[in-house]
Amino acid sequence: MPGSPENFTGEVSIQSQYAGDENSERASDVRFSAGARTAWHTHPDGQRLLITKGTGWVQEWGKKRITVHKGDVVWFAPGVKHWHGATKDSAMAHIAITYAVDGVTADWLEHVTDDQYLGGKRVQGA
């Protein structure tokens, strides 16, 4: 299924791997074309990414962007504002494991601007 333009920039496909009840973990295979990325978002009980293909970028609010590669594992703690996606020149895929709280796995926020995406600098603000 294609990623919603409300939550993603660029070409993204999402395939659910499994989903438990409203308070358990869920996993999805997420594939990003070069230049594609999530919007800023948080997870009420955290998220783990298992990078399965290509090269991508991940960034937590207030920190520098990090480059990730196949085989890397990334953890976002509960409530930490972040984004993730492919680099501008490489596709990237990951298994996203999220943990639901009362059926909610993510709180979606504003889109990552092109300057934020390409800049790789520490992001400041609220």
Image (tube, grey):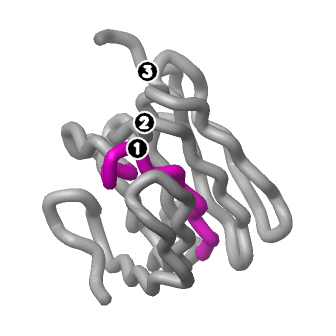
Viewer-side residue, 57 vs 3 = 3
The x and y percentages for residue 47 are 57, 47
First along the sequence among labels 2 and 1: 2
Q: Position of residue 94 (x, y in %)?
A: 62, 70
Q: Specify the amino acid type for callout 3.
A: Val
Nearest to N terminus: mark 1 or mark 3 = 1
Q: Which residue position holds label 2?
A: 44
Quadrant location, the N terminus: bottom left
- Mark closer to the observer (1, 3): 1
Residue 85, image x and y in percent?
Answer: 49, 59
- Name the residue at the left extreme: 6
**Residue under numbered circle 3:** 123
State the image quarter where residue 44 is shown.
Answer: top left
- Label 2 with label 3: CB-CB less than 8 Å: no
Of the residues under marks 2 and 3, which one precedes in the sequence? 2
Name the residue at 60% across, 37% down: 76
Alpha carbon separation for disc pair 1 and 3: 28 Å
Give, as a three-letter code, the residue at label 1.
Val
Q: What SS does tag 1 mark?
A: loop
Mark 1 = which residue?
A: 101
Neighbour class for label 1 at 10 Å: few (<14), some, many (≥20)?
some
- Residue 105: x, y in percent? 39, 51
Q: Which residues are magenta?
A: 93-105
Q: CA distance from mark 2 to mark 3?
A: 21 Å
Contact flag, marks 2 and 1 (Cβ < 8 Å): yes
Q: Is residue 108 left or right of residue 73?
A: left
Left or right: residue 31 compared with residue 126? right
- Which corner quadrant holds the C terminus? top left
- Give the residue displayed 44% in from the left and 27% down from the top: 79
Q: Residue at x 35, y 48 (%)?
A: 106
Mark 3 residue element: loop
